[in-house]
Amino acid sequence: MTLRALGYRMVQALLVALLVGGLTFLMMQALPGDAAFRIAAGRYGYDMVNAAAAAQVRAELGLDGSGWSAFAAWLGDLLRLDFGTSLISGRPVMEEIRHQLGASLQLAGVSLALSLLIGPPLGVIAGLHAGGWLDRGLLVLSAALRAVPQFLMGLILIVTLSIQLGWLPAAGHGRADHLILPALTLALGLAAISARVTRDAMAGVAARPDYAFGRWKGLSERQMLRRHGLRNIGVPLVTFLGLQLVLLIEGVVVVEAIFGWPGIGHALVHAIFGRDVPMVQGTALLLGLGFVLLNALTDLAAHLIDPRGARTP
Amino acid sequence: MRHLLPAALATVLAAPAFATDGVLDVVAPFEIKGADPSTSGAIFIKMELAETLVNADADGRLVPGLATDWTVSDDGLEWIFRLRQGVSFHDGTPMTAGTVASALNHARAKPGLLDTAPITVIEPAGDDLRITLSEPFAPLPAFLSEYRALIYAPAAYDAAGNATQVIGTGPYRLTAMQEPLRLEAERFDGYWGEAAHIPQVTYQAVGRAETRALLAESGDADYVFTLDPASVARLASVETVQVMSVPIPRSLLVKVNAGHPVLSEPDARRALSLAIDRDGLAQAILRYPTGADQLLPPSVPDWHVDGLPPLAYDPQAARALLEGLGWTPGPDGILTRDGQRFSLVLTTYPDRPELPLSAAVLQQMLAQIGVELTIDSTNSSEIPVRHGDGSLDLALLARNFALVPDPIGTILTDYATGGDWGAMGWNDEGFATLIRDLASGKGGQAERDQAMAILQDQLPVIPVAWYQQTAAVSTRVTGAAIDPFERSIGLSRMDWTE
């Protein structure tokens, strides 16, 4: 069954690659404005673009050629795992993406880990004592944290932790401590939700008859949680985390801009402005495949936690 | 959560955060787009990684760079640049007339200023560099001081002539480049001139103005280039930061399609100009004390004319001028003439955040005299596109007149023929002749004054404000500079205060 699931994901990955490639290509074609001028503005600066620069770009890139031949060429290159070169910087797309996707994954990974340290443990405690002061306090706090937009959260953290307390660098990239503030900005929002999800799952499990039976049997709270609690809340939590990663990618774009982080969100936005089609296609493709991989991993994890398994396709 | 947060932080926090590690950190909004001077040379020249043949001082006077002096033949067609001897590139190769010629020929093959100069040949002549022209062109040395004319080593270029590495001659040598946001450099020990004081420097691009200001305030950055107006006011009260500002030859102006039926009469353009409360706009949006009263600021003495009647704010007079042209208010207050409404589209772009805001203010001001403005804030390249196909009405833009220290280059391309970022549908033979003569070395201050008076009277563009360049510098460093021509930040002359 795992093999079948894997095969299904492989087919899905292939379809995603084709769809993403085709759709981004069509969308870039459909964008208004003259591509040669947009690329020239991206290359030489927004106020350095003029008709002469655009004409030179047009001649260099052969923009007068048919769009379909360009798409066919892209597909052909893709089969050879060649993503082409950026129209703006002239460097291989793969090289640019490696640096930028790496930075984003680093940020996303640390945020996720940080949110897991904060959210689920609090959620478990709150769920075990549903209705208690921690539960009610956490509800208010997580609602508040969710309601604060990420750019505001980022600024609040910079002003308090960096400017007032002087603990951390305000923004930038290059040293390990540059990672903490942007990661914390994302993690607080994520932890707010995962704490609620865990709390609800935990409260549900703790109120079940089998949980009460365990208690009558004489198991301690700690034993109950370890043997019966955690695995029961595992499936909803893991499934939810898989979904949350989408949110994370979205948040990364905003947070990268505030903290000057050289990530993929930033790169994608600029590539779209600059009509850097190979860069947009490459980035979107990798993000799409990333989601397929994440879904596969989520399914796999859920399957391991709950092997009864009617859910895996 | 209150307990977890500081604990989590404390575990990850190994080193103190402040940038007192002996590395000077420069922060600016400009992203590194690649190694080629044509895309990111402006960053490399500020970080002193590479140099030009000719330099400019803070007053815009040309001073020796990689060329020690230069002469021009009597007919003005042949320039000889004597090159500095004993200069080596960061890869150890010596700089020769041949390497300089090939670097400049690569630069000339790309869009920029150099390709607009009437150059026929750039070649070595013994140890010197010879540039042959098809017609006299006085601003040539100024053109060679621009960032797109940076001199790189031959190994920096690929077969197509694009630079793939930054191998210059500057006092700093690139050690790491992470496009688009960061580079690191160290002192180059083989530098021909006075060595840099601070051994290690970094450059970080940060697009958001709020973040840049916070980096200055927290002490993470030592030199922060370009501040937003609100942050200037706030940083002025921060003790560890010094805010510097200098007027620069960049003007906020309204480009006018003088070929448009409602804008072709000079009086119509004068009326629009009279409707603009420049001081009000400058104070509200840019937080400068005053607006512009002619095209270029007093900091460009050759092109600022003291006696010129200033552009004034007088909506009454504006209405009278338009009435004189036959415009009468329609039922909704908007002027009409022969069934045509005085309704225009103002194109602008958000890359400079003050532009859409200023556009909204202009919309209000012009509404007062019965002119209807629709704002289209879009990609900056739409301005040259619409210039080209004639569909532009008005454009609000910020124009740098000193890409080279001599504004003649920009004025020549923007106004003598009608340029993408200058005049449109406006041709004044007298003006064009004056400027072409000045460019070929004929004429002087009187001719410049005369040319500027024509622009002031005819208003092919309507000047609104003059920009100031701002920077926040940590009190930990001395020797920082702010350059009206945006070439230098004084990097190699900076030192720690201790």
Image: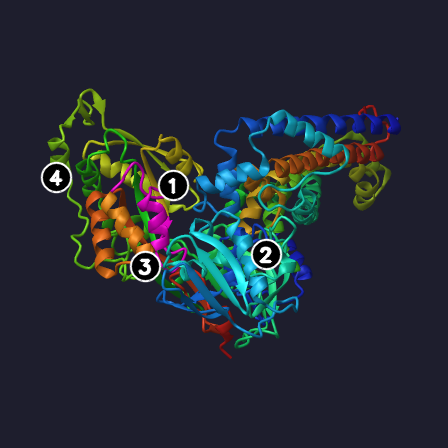
Both marks 3 and 2 on one chain:
yes
Q: Earlier in the sequence, mark 4 or mark 2?
A: 2
* Residue B341 drawn above or below residue B205: above
Q: Nearer the viewer, residue B157 or B335?
A: B157
Which chain letter matches label 3? B
Nearer the observer: mark 1 or 3; the answer is 3
Residue bounds of the magenta highlight: B399-428
* Residue B291 drawn above or below residue A217: below
Q: Earlier in the sequence, mark 1 or mark 3?
A: 1
The residue to which callout 2 is attached is B182
Is there a contact, CB below 8 Å, between mark 4 and mark 3? no
Question: Marks 2 and 1, how far apart in space?
Answer: 32 Å
Question: Marks 4 and 1, how far apart in space?
Answer: 32 Å
Give the numbered dot on residue B441: 3
Q: Earlier in the sequence, mark 3 or mark 2?
A: 2
Q: Nearer the viewer, residue B493 or A139?
A: B493
Q: Earlier in the sequence, mark 2 or mark 1?
A: 2
Where residue B437 appears, as percent x and y from the top left, is 29, 54
Q: Kindly identify the amino acid type of the residue bearing the numbered disc 4.
A: Gln
